[in-house]
Image: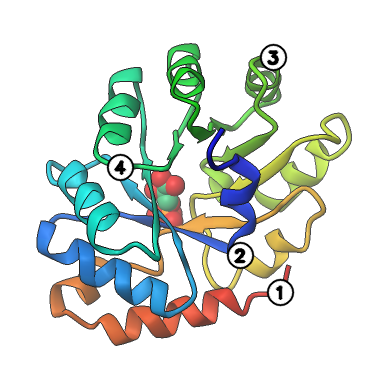
Amino acid sequence: MKLTALEVMQDAPVIPVIVLNDEAHAVPMAKALVAGGIRMLEVTMRTSVALACIRAIAKEVPQAIVGAGTVRSAQDAEAAAAVGAKFMVSPGYTRSVGHACKDMRIALLPGVATSSEIMLTQEDGFQQLKFFPAMQAGGPALLKAWGGPFTDVQFCPTGGVSLENAPQLLSLNNVVCVGGSWLTPAALMQQGNWAEITRMAKEACALPR
Ligand code: 3PG
């Protein structure tokens, strides 16, 4: 494995979940986050330009480590890896996604929201998981409850996470980092307000954990 899932989670307190609608925003957005101290960038495969954006960041922003989010199939994972994604994040888990990432020796943070899903991902050798949609599915209370049976699992809660509720999540023993889209709002990217994205990245990096 070139980069481990734990390394992806440990780099900063927040993994930005990025939705890009314009390929021209990819490089300045990545540079703005890197300038604020965030290197692990999850570009979601939700838009038609996602692969082009991953390719552009991988090529033009060497300080960033770009990954693919919203990976929902083995084909998504293979396409993202082919353009330079260094890690994968999926909203849920399927064995085909898990096996594709293992075959490519690429780190995957599989998404879970139930105990059975945690057990399935553990069976397939995953210990670092995305908890999605975190705040909607049970938030800190569910994470605390999972800390009972699942002592060896580490989570990145994502979904409804904000600068305000992140500290409570990050204070939990089984949370290494959080994920969220709040660092890269569409309106700021549209305005080209990269300085504000850098400011928010710095603020996110200063979160205690
Ligand atoms: C994700 O895929 O992780 C979510 O879309 C991020 O959730 P948020 O937009 O509520 O931060």
Q: Nearer the viewer, mark 4 or mark 3?
A: 4
Residue type pointed to by label 4:
Gly
Q: CA distance from mark 4 to mark 3?
A: 28 Å
| Vertical order, 96 against 36 (above or below) | above
Upstream in sequence: badge 1 or badge 3:
3
Upstream in sequence: badge 2 or badge 3:
2
Upstream in sequence: badge 2 or badge 1:
2
Question: What residue do we see at 30% from left, 42% from top?
Answer: 84
Q: Where is residue 144 shown, x and y percent of the image?
A: 81, 46
Q: Where is residue 116 shown, x and y percent of the image?
A: 68, 18
Which residue is label 1 attached to?
208
The C terminus: image quadrant? bottom right
Q: Residues within 10 Å of mark 1 (few under 14, many from 20)?
A: few
Q: Quadrant of residue 74?
A: top left
Q: Quadrant of residue 21?
A: bottom left
Q: Where is residue 200 shown, x and y percent of the image?
A: 44, 80
Q: CA distance from mark 2 to mark 3?
A: 27 Å
Q: Where is residue 58 shown, x and y percent of the image?
A: 29, 53
Q: Nearer the viewer, residue 142 or 208?
A: 208
Residue type pointed to by label 1:
Pro
Q: Is residue 100 left or right of residue 189?
A: right
Which residue is label 2 attached to?
13
SS class of the residue under badge 4? Answer: loop
Question: What residue do we see at 89% from left, 35% from top?
Answer: 148
Residue type pointed to by label 3:
Glu
